[in-house]
Image: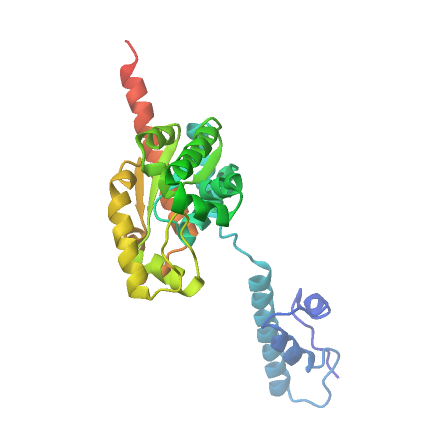
Amino acid sequence: MEIIQAPAGCFDLLHQKPFHSPSISIRNRISSLSLTSINNTSPLSLNNSRKLLTASCSLLDDALSVQTFEVDPMLDIKKKAMVVSPGLKGTSIYLVGINSTMKSRLGNLLAEALRYYYFDSDNLVMEAAGGEAAVKQLLDMDKVGLRESETEVLRQLSSMGRLVVSAGDGAVQTSTNLSLLRHGISIWVDVPLDLVAKEIVEGGVRLFGSDISPTASHSEVLSRLSMLYKQMQEGYAIADVTISLQKVAGGLGYEDVESVSAEDMGMEVLTEIEKLIRVKKMMEDAARPF
């Protein structure tokens, strides 16, 4: 009788508690082998058993390595934020552009990476007005009052720092509101209108301050969005930086814009902010007397 010794480290792994992963089938296969003895076997079959056991343990080791190795999808964003943050010095960031899922996700992601607070200005206006029904009433009967509420919300937000603000369309409709955005860095999040229309129709999303109905057809919603876009485009274009979903997709080699993640957009935003900070520093250095 000859004892087959399991390769170093494998025996302990075999006696760990089972875990839920694709490697469980590998564990079952290995458990069917006898680790104590093999009787009446030829040297050739014994050698093959050793090779099978060694190979199986190697597979188990690899499977366990995959199971325990997790990558934080925010890791690169957080690293970039650590580089950008000192130069940012707590300056707030305002995201403008037609509201979309990407805009909201991007705002939350940037706030988390930079350790800022996140606010949606439309939600704040809605709370101040007394709810969605009250906003609709203002939209129908007192648009001036609604715009004044938007200005007041922006004024209060602009007096604070370390904020990421998802700004509604009211932020780019008056010179007063545009001047309030100058208290921070403004980013135009340019999302294809077709994608926004899809979110409205399929997700039942209702744009704040707009009478675009989510029950309308995709073509009708897209047509209304195009009209809204033309009205707002000049205000959007005043932003310090434009981040286009289509350009990011092209730069990353994605065939579909929906493949672009909030992390992809976040990295692009932080890269552009880093450029702004660098230019500002160069201008400040150039203005210093010899």
In the rendered image, which quarter contains the N terminus? bottom right
Q: Is residue 253 visible?
A: no
- Residue 99 vs residue 161, the one in the foreground: 99
Spot occupied by residue 143 in the image (x, y as percentages of width and height): 38, 40
Q: Single out the residue that lies furthest toward the top.
A: 290
So how many labels did they put on this image?
0
The residue sitting at 58% across, 70% down in the picture is 58
Q: Is residue 82 above or below residue 289?
A: below
Spot occupied by residue 69 in the image (x, y as percentages of width and height): 56, 58
In the image, taking residue 4 as reference, residue 87 lies left or right, namely left
> Which of the 4 quarters of the picture holds residue 177?
top left
The residue sitting at 24% across, 47% down in the picture is 230
Spot occupied by residue 244 in the image (x, y as percentages of width and height): 30, 49
Q: Is residue 53 above or below residue 251?
A: below
In the image, taking residue 76 as reference, residue 244 lies left or right, namely left
- Residue 117 vs residue 1, the one in the foreground: 117
Q: Is residue 187 above or below residue 13?
A: above
The residue sitting at 60% across, 65% down in the picture is 64
- Residue 269 vs residue 76, the one in the foreground: 269
Spot occupied by residue 61 in the image (x, y as percentages of width and height): 60, 66
> Which of the 4 quarters of the picture holds residue 290?
top left
Q: Is residue 158 visible?
A: yes
**Colour treatment of the image:** rainbow
- Residue 262 vs residue 50, the one in the foreground: 262
